[in-house]
């Protein structure tokens, strides 16, 4: 499966949500904030910044689900602006997660205020680095996306 298929699946999910929720206004900024919140939830599950705690990170599956929650909004923002990518940004940069979460937040915020295609690509690059440092493969991400995508449809059908 290619990224362009995920963009299409996200377009269909967004259309379903907009129809189901009777959304008539531009929700780009709301989706941008949602992406930032999902990234923060991901950071929270990794516990990478919690120097005061001896408790380790959440289970891998929980961290992967939070990662994919971000990917939903990242795809959605690209669809909103007509930007897409066909290939996952492969990287092997070993980075400090805390610093990289902050970097990713900066890049997202910059994109929300000035939604350029280069800015959008920079977010994807950040997510490639995060995925590598969290030990996620493209296959992991796609499988988790497919699972969560269906869960999101079910949530809409049941009044989430």
Image (spheres, grey):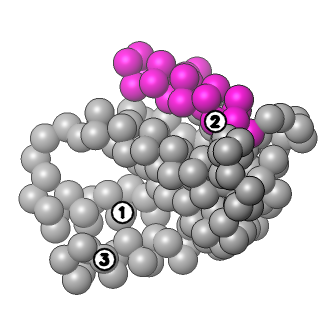
Quarter of the image that includes the N terminus? bottom right
Q: Is residue 62 visible?
A: yes
Cβ atoms at labels 3 and 2 below 8 Å apart: no
Of tags 3 and 1, which is closer to the observer? Answer: 3
Quarter location, residue 80 = top left
Judge the density around disc 1: few (<14), some (14-19), many (≥20) Cα neighbours within 10 Å: few
Marking on residue 101:
2
| Stretch of the chain drawn in magenta | 97-121
- The reply to whether dot 2 and dot 1 touch (C-beta < 8 Å) is no
Q: In the structure shown, which secondary structural element does the residue marked by tag 2 occupy?
A: helix
Q: Which residue is mark 1?
A: 12
Q: Is residue 98 magenta?
A: yes
Which residue is rendered at x = 84% and y = 40% of the image? 91
The C terminus sits in image quarter? bottom left
Nearer the observer, disc 2 or disc 1?
2
The image shows residue 63 at horizontal and vertical percentages of: 64, 62
Q: Position of residue 111 (x, y in %)?
A: 46, 23
Label 3 to label 2: alpha-carbon separation: 28 Å
Query: Is residue 101 found inside the magenta-colored segment of the image?
Result: yes
């Amino acid at each position: 499966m290619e990224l362009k298929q995920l963009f299409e699946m996200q377009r269909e999910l967004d259309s379903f949500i907009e129809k189901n929720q009777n959304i008539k206004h531009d929700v780009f900024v709301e989706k941008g904030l949602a992406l930032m919140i999902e990234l923060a939830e991901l950071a929270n599950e990794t516990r990478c910044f919690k120097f005061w705690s001896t408790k380790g990170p959440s289970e891998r599956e929980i961290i992967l689900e939070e990662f994919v929650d971000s990917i939903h909004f990242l795809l959605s923002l690209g669809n909103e602006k007509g930007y897409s990518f066909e290939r996952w940004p492969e990287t092997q940069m070993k980075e400090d997660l805390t610093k990289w979460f902050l970097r990713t937040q900066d890049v997202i915020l910059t994109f929300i205020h000035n939604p350029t295609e280069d800015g959008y690509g920079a977010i994807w690059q950040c997510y490639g680095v995060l995925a590598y440092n969290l030990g996620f493969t493209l296959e992991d991400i796609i499988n988790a996306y497919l699972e969560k995508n269906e869960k999101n449809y079910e949530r809409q059908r049941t009044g989430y």
